[in-house]
Amino acid sequence: MKNKKFLGILISTLLGLGLVTYTKDPFLSIFIYICLVAVYKLIRALVFLQINLRDS
């Protein structure tokens, strides 16, 4: 579990650095990053919901 959390933090940091380097605008990169995190959490919630519905 610790490795999974560490990997998530590492990927998150690399994505943030990549966005700042690519856009050259920290505010735009923060906005894009927040949107990507929201989409990721939405997809994860939908997959979790689908798995729970299938199991019941």
Image: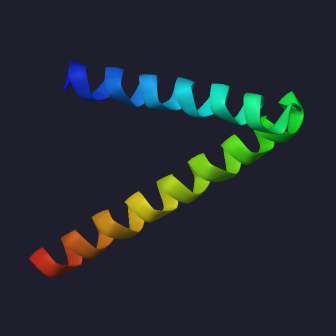
Q: Is residue 45 left or right of residue 41?
A: left
Q: Is residue 27 left or right of residue 8?
A: right
Q: Quadrant of residue 11?
A: top left
Q: Is residue 6 above or below residue 32?
A: above
Q: Is residue 56 at all visible to an observer of this figure?
A: no
Q: Is residue 47 left or right of residue 52?
A: right
Report the residue that reaches farthest toward the front: 22
Q: Is residue 2 above or below residue 49?
A: above
Image quadrant for the C terminus?
bottom left
Give the residue at x 39% y 69%: 46
Q: Quadrant of residue 50?
A: bottom left
Q: Is residue 13 left or right of residue 54?
A: right
Give the residue at x 65% y 32%: 18
Give the residue at x 52% y 31%: 12
Q: Is residue 49 above or below residue 34?
A: below
Q: Is residue 35 above or below residue 11?
A: below
